Image (cartoon, grey):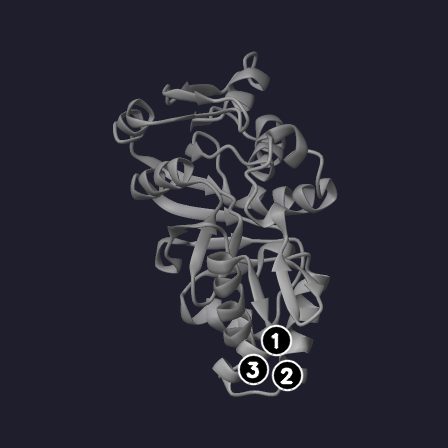
Amino acid sequence: MKAFERKEKIIQELHRHKKVLVSQLATSFEVTEETIRRDLEKLEQEGVVTRNYGGAVLNAHIHEDLPYQTRNTRNIEEKRSISSLLLPLINDEDTLMTDTSSTVFEALKLLESERDNLTIITNSVIILNEFSQTSHTIISTGGSLRPKASSLIGPVARQAIQNYNVDIALFSCKGISVMSGITDSNEPESELKQAMSQQARQTILLIDSSKFDHIGFVKMLEFKQISYIITDRRPSDEWISFLENQDITLLHP
């Protein structure tokens, strides 16, 4: 078993049980306890776990569906870097479906000034508010309000999405994993993103580099549904090779 595969299985164990023991993992993977300790040390450096005597526990924020106001203040420069790489892929008069992520919102702020006559279909209350005076066409999905996420969800939103066919779906996510695919923290929002992707000619994933090798609570999309992944930093050689094999175009600075 390769190191990244073992790492993902450790994360899966953490999601199931919230904690792991070095001795049990070493036995399960047939490796030394020192190897497991190094794995857990890397996960701690990435903010996934907190190590303790004999093992590690899952950090609470990995499961959190953070409020928009919190997400919007994180990694601003990385989001702007991603937005600049997205710009050449979007043409005047394109039709878009977008999620509620702060990364997508940052990208739309750039597109709003650099492109003409876009049509944007979204379940984001923030986008609806902030673009209320735009010259572009903004269409709300409607639906039930999730106040914490400033999003609209539910059957009304899903039905609205299914009424349109668009050029591009723009998403972010909680994490991407070779074994677990593209994952997010909230099931109702993930279901809407699945519906949006089905209605789009291309799906573009906007993620900062911290999302690689992380696993969120719920499966969102398969890699075969993604046309582009745009990130702020070059990922590992293993990721580059994997995405090439998946026929996904990777863009980074």
* Disc 2 residue crowd, few under 14, some 14–19, many 20+, Cα 10 Å: some
* Disc 3 residue crowd, few under 14, some 14–19, many 20+, Cα 10 Å: some
Q: Of 187 and 80, which appears nearest the observer?
A: 187
Compare marks 3 and 2 and give the one earlier in the sequence.
3
Quarter of the figure with the C terminus: bottom right
* Disc 1 residue crowd, few under 14, some 14–19, many 20+, Cα 10 Å: many
Calculate the distance from the C-alpha at mark 3 to the C-alpha at mark 2.
5 Å
Q: Of 211 and 93, which appears nearest the observer?
A: 211
Mark 1 = which residue?
A: 22
Residue 26's disc number: 3
Amino acid type for the residue under numbered disc 3: Ala
> Residue 102's x, y, as percent?
60, 35
> Residue 66's x, y, as percent?
59, 36
Mark 2 = which residue?
A: 33
Task: Work out whether 158 lies above or below 228.
Answer: above
> In the picture provided, is 188 more to the left or to the right than 217?
left
Evaluate if marks 1 and 2 touch, with contact meaning CB atoms under 8 Å apart: yes
Tag 3 secondary structure:
helix
Evaluate if marks 1 and 3 touch, with contact meaning CB atoms under 8 Å apart: yes
Calculate the distance from the C-alpha at mark 1 to the C-alpha at mark 3.
6 Å
Tag 1 secondary structure:
helix
Evaluate if marks 3 and 2 touch, with contact meaning CB atoms under 8 Å apart: yes
> In the picture provided, is 62 more to the left or to the right than 225?
right
Q: Of 66 and 85, which appears nearest the observer?
A: 66
In percent of the image, x 50 and y 40: which residue is there?
90
In percent of the image, x 57 and y 12: which residue is there?
133
